[in-house]
Image (tube, helix red, strand yellow):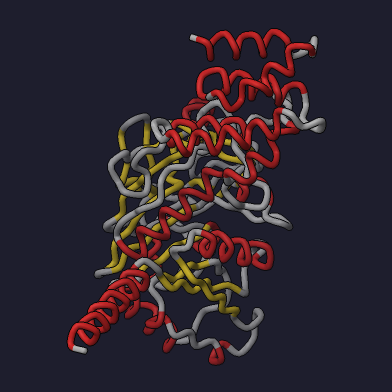
């Protein structure tokens, strides 16, 4: 009886331990939205999807009254959350809400400043300290200095007169990682191409306790230069590298500020860009916890081109195997690249390789699979295949389009 009682105590203790670990691994996030000069109806459900599908967050959305509405009804309980994501640019909050928000951040709450949220509250001094840099809302030299890079030199004290906030026509643009040691950007490529988006420039603000993680080159007109003015041509050609990813500390709070992610109906290329998705999620985790556990995914973009995730979800093994049969190198290589990356991850695990081999053979013998797909699979089976795949490969020797690849696979296998 005593042993049984002791066993129950141990089990109860383990359950308590694992429950605590599970609780510690998840963060509660609040997405604040409801007014914006951008499409907040499109952006906020995507932000929620991105956060929730990581398994790290459970998120709620709170929608403010409409513009001109009764803001006294907007009373979020910030203290219930680990993270607040600001997707808001609209009417001033009440003093009660402002005070609660500042208390939340000062006491260690995490904040993500998303895209046009840095346009909001130009007259609120403490908010501007939280976001570091802001734009529009009649911001000017009184709002703080411009902060940017000239080549590899950071400029933090440009107090010249001029507007705060502008952007040119939407386009794809190259992002340059500036800090390779910060948890958010550690492991990112030096340069990567971002999907069609607004490139914010000429942001200005207090910039206190702010660290720039990444920049993008903007050739937007210089401060004070009127549109169409051809004077100062050399300055305009020179341009400068504007901050696009930043961190700020405010009291005990951690803030991640991303200017990326302009929302179209359904999200659009800026929000579908893997670069935006990954940096947003890594920034959110860091703001909530001070650390980043998410790995850089195989499909993170490089300088060679933008990588888009329709549906905003990272590809899975099931996706890759389901779609590899329709492989067309001229259209997309993402499923193939995923499998190659997966091969590397399971290298040395014979059982995992065999399980994958069996599933690859199923595609190989399918009548629906394309010739390109079968050639691809034969090349991969040539080095990782076992005796299991040999009969199916031999059956393809009579196929004129696949004969060479099949012979190659068998020759390598026999070695």
**Residue visible at 73% across and 22% down in the picture:** 372
User: Which of the 4 quarters of the picture holds residue 410?
Assistant: top right
Q: Is residue 119 visible?
A: no
In this rendering, would 298 be left or right of 334? left
Q: Is residue 353 left or right of residue 324?
A: left
Identify which residue is drawn at 60% across, 78% down: 63
Q: Residue furthest left?
A: 2
* Residue 357 x, y percent position in the rendering: 57, 32
Residue 347 position (above or below residue 23) = above
In this view, the residue in front, 36 or 344, is 344
Q: At 58% from the left edge and 46% from the top edge, which residue is drawn? A: 316
Query: Residue 216 at what x, y percent from top left?
Result: 48, 38
User: Vertically, is 49 above or below 315?
Assistant: below
**Viewer-proximal residue, 27 or 146?**
27
Percent position of residue 295, x then y: 41, 46
Residue 95 in percent (x, y) is at 43, 87
The image shows a total of numbered marks equal to 0
Please state, as top left, top right, bottom left or bottom right, where the N terminus lies in the image: bottom left
Give 269 or 128, whichever is nearer the viewer. 269
Q: Inspect this view and state whether residue 36 appears.
A: yes
Closest to the observer: 159 or 346? Answer: 346
Q: Is residue 81 left or right of residue 324?
A: left
Instruction: Report the residue that reaches farthest toward the front.
Output: 1
């Amino acid at each position: 009886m005593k042993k049984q009682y002791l066993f129950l105590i141990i089990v109860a203790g383990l359950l308590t331990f694992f429950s605590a670990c599970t609780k510690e691994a998840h963060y509660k996030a609040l997405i604040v939205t409801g007014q914006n000069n951008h499409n907040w109806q499109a952006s906020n459900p995507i932000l929620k999807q991105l956060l929730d599908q990581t398994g790290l967050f459970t998120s709620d959305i709170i929608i403010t009254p409409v513009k001109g509405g009764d803001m006294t009804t907007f009373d979020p309980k910030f203290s219930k959350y680990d993270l607040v994501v600001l997707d808001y640019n609209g009417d001033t909050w009440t003093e009660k809400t402002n005070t609660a928000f500042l208390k939340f951040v000062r006491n260690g709450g995490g904040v993500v400043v998303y895209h046009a949220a840095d346009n909001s509250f130009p007259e609120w001094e403490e908010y501007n300290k939280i976001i570091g840099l802001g734009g529009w809302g009649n911001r000017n030299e009184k709002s703080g200095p411009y902060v940017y890079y000239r080549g590899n030199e950071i400029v933090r004290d440009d107090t010249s007169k001029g507007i705060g906030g502008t952007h040119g026509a939407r386009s794809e643009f190259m992002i340059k990682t500036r800090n390779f040691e910060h948890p958010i950007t550690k492991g990112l490529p030096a340069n990567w191409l971002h999907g069609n988006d607004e490139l914010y420039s000429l942001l200005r603000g207090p910039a206190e306790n702010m660290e720039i993680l990444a920049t993008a080159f903007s050739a937007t007109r210089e401060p004070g230069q009127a549109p169409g003015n051809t004077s100062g041509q050399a300055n305009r050609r020179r341009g400068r590298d504007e901050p696009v990813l930043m961190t700020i500390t405010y009291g005990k709070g951690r803030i991640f500020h991303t200017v990326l992610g302009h929302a179209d109906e359904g999200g659009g290329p800026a929000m579908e860009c893997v670069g935006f998705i990954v940096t947003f999620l890594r920034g959110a985790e860091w703001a909530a916890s001070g650390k980043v556990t998410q790995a850089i995914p195989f499909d993170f973009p490089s300088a060679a081109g933008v990588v888009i995730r329709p549906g905003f979800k990272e590809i899975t093994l099931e996706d890759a195997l389901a779609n590899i049969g329709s492989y067309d190198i001229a259209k997309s290589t993402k499923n193939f690249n995923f499998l190659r990356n997966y091969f590397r991850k399971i290298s040395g695990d014979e059982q995992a390789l065999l399980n994958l081999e069996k599933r690859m053979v199923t595609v190989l013998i399918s009548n629906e699979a394309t010739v390109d797909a079968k050639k691809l699979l034969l090349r991969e089976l040539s080095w990782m295949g076992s005796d299991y795949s040999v009969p199916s490969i031999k059956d393809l020797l009579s196929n004129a389009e696949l004969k060479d690849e099949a012979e190659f696979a068998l020759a390598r296998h026999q070695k």
